[in-house]
Image (cartoon, rainbow, N blue to C red):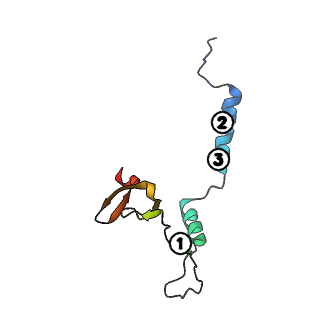
Amino acid sequence: MATDYDDLRPEVKEAQEQSLEALQTANAPTAKSAVVELEESDEPDTAPAGEIITEELIVEVVPPRQDEFTCSSCFLVHHHSQIAREHDGMLYCTECEA
């Protein structure tokens, strides 16, 4: 009798068949039920149009210090050691000039 080394062992083959049968009989959601489920759970995160929002957002704005500058390209505040060039009174950082 010739042995086929590429063939699966009987217990592995049986386990695969059982798991395939379990998947086929499982109550898997259909595409339509998944869409309905998404629509039901889809609640807007923002206020509806025309509604007045009474909450107030308070942000403290800190001006640049004497040793800092605002890049005219990326508008980020950097330390003066990051100045790459000055052109017409506008300062540019080393990251934007790279």
Q: Amino acid at mark 1?
A: Val
Q: Residues within 10 Å of mark 2 (few under 14, many from 20)?
A: few
Q: Amino acid at mark 2?
A: Gln
Looking at this view, name the residue that lies furthest to the top: 1
Horizontal side of residue 84 vs 26, given as left or right: left
Q: Which is more N-terminal, label 2 or label 3?
A: 2
Residue situated in front as seen by the camera: 89 or 30: 89
Q: Residues within 10 Å of mark 1 (few under 14, many from 20)?
A: few
Residue situated in front as seen by the camera: 73 or 51: 73
Q: Secondary structure at mark 3?
A: helix
Q: Residue at x 62, y 14 (%)?
A: 3
Number of callouts in the render?
3
Report the Cα–Cα distance between label 1 and label 3. 59 Å
Question: Disc 2 designates what residue?
Answer: 16
Question: Disc 3 designates what residue?
Answer: 23
Report the Cα–Cα distance between label 2 and label 1. 64 Å
Nearer mark to the viewer, of 1 and 3 = 1
Q: Residue at x 54, y 77 (%)?
A: 46
Q: Which is more N-terminal, label 3 or label 1?
A: 3
Q: Quadrant of the N terminus?
A: top right
Q: Secondary structure at mark 2?
A: helix
Q: Position of residue 39 (x, y in %)?
A: 56, 70
Report the Cα–Cα distance between label 3 and label 2. 11 Å
Q: Which is more N-terminal, label 1 or label 2?
A: 2
Question: Disc 1 designates what residue?
Answer: 62
